[in-house]
Image (cartoon, rainbow, N blue to C red):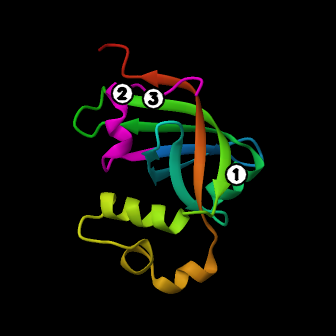
Amino acid sequence: MQNPIPNTHLDLFREPVHGVLTTMMPDGTPQSSVVWVDCDGEYVLINTTLERQKGRNMQANPKVTILVIDPKDSSRWVEVRGLVMEMTRNGAEVHADKLTQRYCPGKRHFYGDVYPPEQKEKETRVIVKIQPIKTTLDAIFR
């Protein structure tokens, strides 16, 4: 990993803190989405579908940014600029269930508890592995 997320900010990727993922539209304009975030020690992980705008954008242009702000202290944040290294179906539904349990206490399954079960047949769920290239921390006045 070129610029890993420091241990001081890993909690923002391991607790139920929402991130903002910015991808690039085909016309070059930015597109931002609120996402559930995760980290495996090497990659930032998000879970989405190939059919959503962010999924289509990342397939066309792997450059992304993720911003995660500590909800308890808005001057504590991490911005990760990175490259999508892989979009894999392997384990994507299990990962979605893991994130559901983190972000939606009392719920166990993404399909069935968050989205209707039949939605699974209409989309291609993937884990997006993002290699951090540049990591920036916290507000300048800290």
User: Which of the labelled discs sits on residue 57, or is there none?
Assistant: 1
User: Which of the labelled discs sits on residue 101, or is there none?
Assistant: none
Camera-nearest label, 2 or 1 = 2
Toward the top, the furthest residue is 141
User: Which of the labelled discs sits on residue 5, or is there none?
Assistant: 3
Extent of the magenta region: 1-19
Identify the residue at image location x=36%, y=27%.
Answer: 7
Instruction: Provide the residue designation for mark 2.
Output: 7
Residue 23 lies left or right of residue 9; in this view the side is right
Identify the residue at image location x=66%, y=43%.
Answer: 84
Q: Is residue 7 above or below residue 114?
A: above
Identify the residue at image location x=64%, y=58%.
Answer: 88
Q: Is residue 16 above or below residue 67?
A: below
Residue 1: image location, x then y, percent: 58, 28
Could you say which quadrant of the image residue 126 lies in? Answer: bottom right
Judging depth in this view, the residue of 61 and 98 nearest the camera is 98
Q: Secondary structure at mark 2?
A: helix
Closer to the N terminus: mark 3 or mark 1? Answer: 3
Residue 101: image location, x then y, percent: 32, 63
Q: Secondary structure at mark 1?
A: helix
Identify the residue at image location x=32%, y=58%.
Answer: 103
Please tell me how many numbered marks the rendered image carries.
Answer: 3
Query: Label 3: few (<14), some or many (≥20) within 10 Å?
Result: many
> Residue 11 lies in magenta, yes or no?
yes
